[in-house]
Image (cartoon, helix red, strand yellow):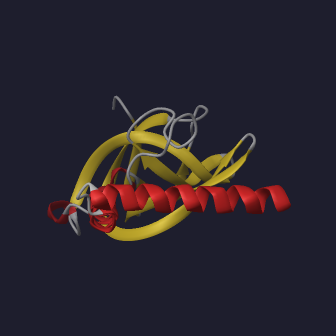
Amino acid sequence: ALAEQSYDASFTTKAQALREQLAKDGIDVDGLFAARLAIMEKREAAASGVNEDILDKSVRMPGYVLPLEFKDRKVVEFLLVPTVGACIHTPPPPPNQIVHVSYPEGIEVNGLFTPVWITGTMMAQSSVQKVGYSDGQADVSVSYTMRPNRVEKYGK
């Protein structure tokens, strides 16, 4: 614990010296951090903001099924994701590229990432869904939800 404290003190001292040097050179460190935070917030808003043109309208869209819940060997709840492997083999897409789908009728799938068309009314609803992996689980942020009146295998 003592080594950690001396490391922290050394790091803090170096950071303060660097901050003072940058200030002498006319660089506004606090301003840069504030600008960075504003950019991060804008990127987050862009990634989670919904497309108003498709809300409360019937849409038909393709994607891949990432199952969340099964009933009688059929998927009754899933995430519709834009790419194979999304959320499991790669970082999740932005929340506004994922749809949380509840489909009580269920659909049979062949393993992960079955390609489908969903047809129904698109709704904006932010949520965080737990996606299970072979070695654990992760939270995935989602911007849309749909309870489709039709789910069909891609190619039909």
Name the spot of residue 41 as percent of width and height, x first: 32, 65
Q: Say which quadrant the N terminus sits in.
A: bottom right
For the point 33% across and 56% down, the residue is 22
Q: Residue at x 47, y 46 (%)?
A: 92
| Residue 50 left/right relative to 82 | left
Task: Examine the image and state in which quarter residue 139 appears.
Answer: bottom right
Task: Tell me if residue 153 comes above or below residue 1 in the rendering.
Answer: above
Q: Is residue 148 visible?
A: no
Give the image location of residue 97, x and y in percent: 34, 50
Report the number of discs: 0
Return the x and y of residue 134 as percentages of the image width and height.
73, 40
> Which residue sits at x=40%, y=52%?
98
In the image, what residue occupies the spot 38% across and 71% down? Answer: 125
Quadrant placement of the C terminus: top left
25 sits to left or right of 100: left
Residue extending furthest right? Answer: 1
Question: Residue 87 placed where, x, y %?
Answer: 53, 43
Query: 133 or 31, which lies in front?
Result: 31
Residue 57, above or below 140 = below
